[in-house]
Image (cartoon, helix red, strand yellow):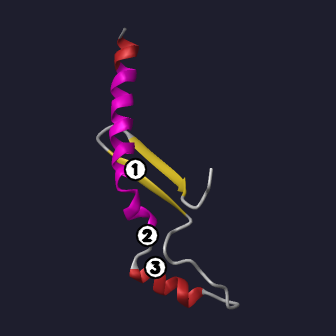
Amino acid sequence: MYIDQLRAIMKDKYDAISSDILTYIGNYTKYTDAEIEKLKEDATGGRKMDYSTRPEFTEQKKNQDVSLAIWANVTAKS
């Protein structure tokens, strides 16, 4: 009984954190202007880069007693 209550509480906390990240996923997948400039400076060999979306990102959120990180492969088709 007690374990079930703790699991329910933890599940609710993970749901709240992950829903916040996934709701604002567009904010995490876009490069900032400074990041785009850095990528352009570092580009070598005439490669063309897609500056519209990051290929992947990692975001970590915390609350008082839970830390959750999400890694996303944004360009994956599956």
Is residue 10 on the magenta stretch?
yes
Residue 8 among magenta residues:
yes
The amino acid on which the numbered mark 2 sits, given as a three-letter code, is: Lys
Residue under circle 2?
A: 30
Residue at position x 37%, y 36% in the image = 15
Label 1 amino acid? Leu
What is the span of residues highlighted in magenta in the rendered image? 6-30
Q: Is residue 13 above or below residue 33?
A: above
Other residues around mark 1 within 10 Å, as few (<14) / some (14–19) / many (≥20): few
Residue for badge 3 = 35
Label 3 amino acid? Glu
Q: Are marks 2 and 1 in contact (CB under 8 Å)?
A: no
Dot 3: what SS? helix
- Residue at the front extreme of this rendering: 77
Q: Is residue 65 left or right of residue 34?
A: left
CA–CA distance between discs 2 and 1? Answer: 14 Å
Q: Position of residue 54 (x, y in %)?
A: 52, 68
- Does dot 2 land on a helix, a strand or a loop? loop
Task: Provide the residue designation for mark 1.
Answer: 22
Tell me which label, 3 or 1, sits earlier in the chain. Answer: 1
Nearest to N terminus: mark 2 or mark 1: 1
